[in-house]
C-alpha cells in the first residue's frame, strides 16, 4: 500500500452511508439538527477530534441555535435512538465512520483504515472468503459467529495475513475476534508467533495434532513432513565427510536401463567380474578374483 505524506492538521472527512441517512430521517427536527451541528463541531478540531460531546459544552457544539433545555431533550432523543451514548461527562457519538485522528494523521494507519473500508464494500470478495474458510477461524479453527455480537471472542472478523497487504483473496482470511484483535492485532504472523492453517481446519483438528500449519510458525518448510521416511538417509553428523556421489550403473545389457539402480561409487558391483578390484576388502585382502596360470617351469598354480 502506498501512503503519501499527510499534513499535521489534516482531519478525517465526514463520512455517512445510506443506512445512516435513513436512520437520521426518523429523528425530530431538533435532534436532527443537533446531530449535524455536533458532527461539524467535532470534525473541525474541537475536543481534539474525539467523537465525544462534553455535556458542559452542548450549547457550543450546537452553536447556540436552541436553548439548553431544547438541546438536552434533543440529546435524549439521540440516546434513545442509539445514535449517541450517554456517558458520565460526555455524550459518545456512536453513529460515525471517522477514524481516530491519530490514525488518520499516520500514513500507514490511514492507508490501512481506507483499505479496510474498501474491503467492507466488496461484498462479492467477502462472500467468497466466507465460502472458502467455512466460517472457521484460520488461526485457531473455532467456528465464528456473525450475529452482530461484537463483544464475543468468537464473533467473526476479516483479517489481513500481511497487515500492509491488499484486499486480495489470498491475503484476507476469516478470524475470530480473539485471534484478530487480541493476539495478532496489526502484526505479521511471525511477530505475533501465530500459525495459519488450511481452510476448513477445525479446533479439534489442531488440538488432536491432525492439522499442520502452512504459514509463519510452520517455518520455511511448512509443507514438508515432520518426520523422515524410512528410505531417507540419516542426516550427517557434524564433522562427517560428505557422502560420495551417486552414479548410475547398469545392471543389464544397457547402462541406461530403467531398471539400473543408483548406487555409491564405492560399492562393488556383484554382477561384473573384477569391479571393485582396487578396493581392498576387510582385513587388507584384495577382492580381485584369482585365475589359474602356469609359471615358467610348467607348474600350474590355482
Image (cartoon, rainbow, N blue to C red):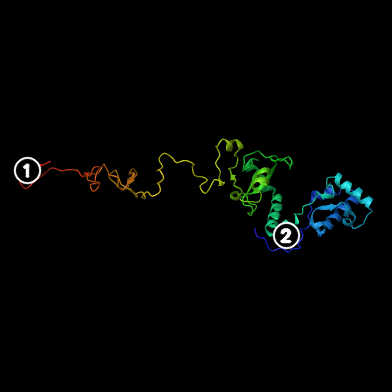
Residue 262 location (% of width, % of height)? 34, 45
Q: Give the label, 1 or 2, closer to the camera.
A: 2
In the picture provided, is 10 more to the left or to the right than 125?
A: right
Q: Nearer the viewer, residue 103 or 241?
A: 241
Q: Nearer the viewer, residue 300 or 252?
A: 300
Residue 18 visible to an observer of this rendering:
yes
Residue 60 location (% of width, % of height)? 89, 57
Image point 58% across, 38% down: which residue? 206
**Image disc number at residue 299:** 1
Residue 199 location (% of width, % of height)? 60, 42
**Image disc number at residue 105:** 2
Q: What is the spatial separation of the Cα atoms under label 1 and label 2, in whole angstroms?
A: 106 Å
- Count of marks, rendered view: 2
Residue found at the far front of this picture:
239
In the picture provided, is 237 more to the left or to the right than 186?
A: left
Q: Residues within 10 Å of mark 2 (few under 14, many from 20)?
A: some
Residue 185 location (% of width, % of height)? 66, 49
Task: Assign a secondary structure to mark 2.
Answer: helix
Task: Assign a secondary structure to mark 1.
Answer: loop
**Image quadrant where one finds the C terminus:** top left
Residue 26 visible to an observer of this rendering:
no
Amino acid at each position: 500500500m502506498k501512503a503519501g505524506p499527510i499534513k499535521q492538521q489534516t482531519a478525517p472527512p465526514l463520512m455517512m452511508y445510506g443506512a445512516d441517512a435513513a436512520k437520521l430521517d426518523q429523528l425530530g427536527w431538533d435532534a436532527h439538527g443537533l446531530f449535524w451541528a455536533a458532527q461539524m463541531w467535532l470534525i473541525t478540531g474541537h475536543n481534539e477530534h474525539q467523537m465525544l460531546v462534553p455535556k458542559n459544552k452542548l450549547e457550543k457544539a450546537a452553536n447556540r441555535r436552541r436553548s439548553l433545555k431544547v438541546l438536552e431533550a434533543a440529546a435524549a432523543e439521540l440516546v434513545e435512538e442509539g445514535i449517541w451514548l450517554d456517558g458520565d461527562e460526555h455524550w459518545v457519538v456512536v453513529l460515525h465512520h471517522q477514524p481516530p485522528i491519530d490514525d488518520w494523521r499516520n500514513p500507514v494507519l490511514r492507508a490501512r483504515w481506507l483499505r479496510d473500508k474498501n474491503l467492507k464494500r466488496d461484498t462479492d470478495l467477502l462472500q467468497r472468503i466466507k465460502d472458502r474458510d467455512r466460517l472457521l477461524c484460520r488461526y485457531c479453527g473455532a467456528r465464528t459467529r456473525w450475529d452482530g455480537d461484537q463483544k464475543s471472542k468468537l464473533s467473526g472478523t476479516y483479517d489481513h495475513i500481511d497487515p500492509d497487504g491488499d484486499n486480495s483473496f489470498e491475503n484476507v482470511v476469516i478470524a475470530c475476534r480473539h485471534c484478530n484483535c487480541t493476539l495478532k492485532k496489526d502484526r505479521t504472523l511471525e511477530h505475533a508467533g501465530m500459525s495459519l492453517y488450511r481452510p476448513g481446519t477445525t479446533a479439534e483438528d489442531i488440538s488432536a495434532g491432525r492439522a499442520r500449519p502452512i504459514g509463519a510458525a510452520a517455518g520455511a518448510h511448512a509443507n514438508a513432513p515432520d518426520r523422515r521416511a524410512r528410505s531417507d538417509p540419516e542426516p550427517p553428523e557434524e564433522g562427517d565427510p560428505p557422502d560420495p556421489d551417486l552414479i548410475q550403473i547398469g545392471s543389464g545389457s544397457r547402462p541406461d536401463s530403467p531398471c539400473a539402480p543408483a548406487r555409491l561409487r564405492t560399492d562393488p558391483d556383484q554382477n561384473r567380474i573384477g569391479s571393485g578390484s582396487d578396493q581392498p576388502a576387510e582385513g587388507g585382502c584384495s577382492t580381485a578374483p584369482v585365475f589359474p596360470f602356469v609359471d615358467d617351469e610348467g607348474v600350474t598354480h590355482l
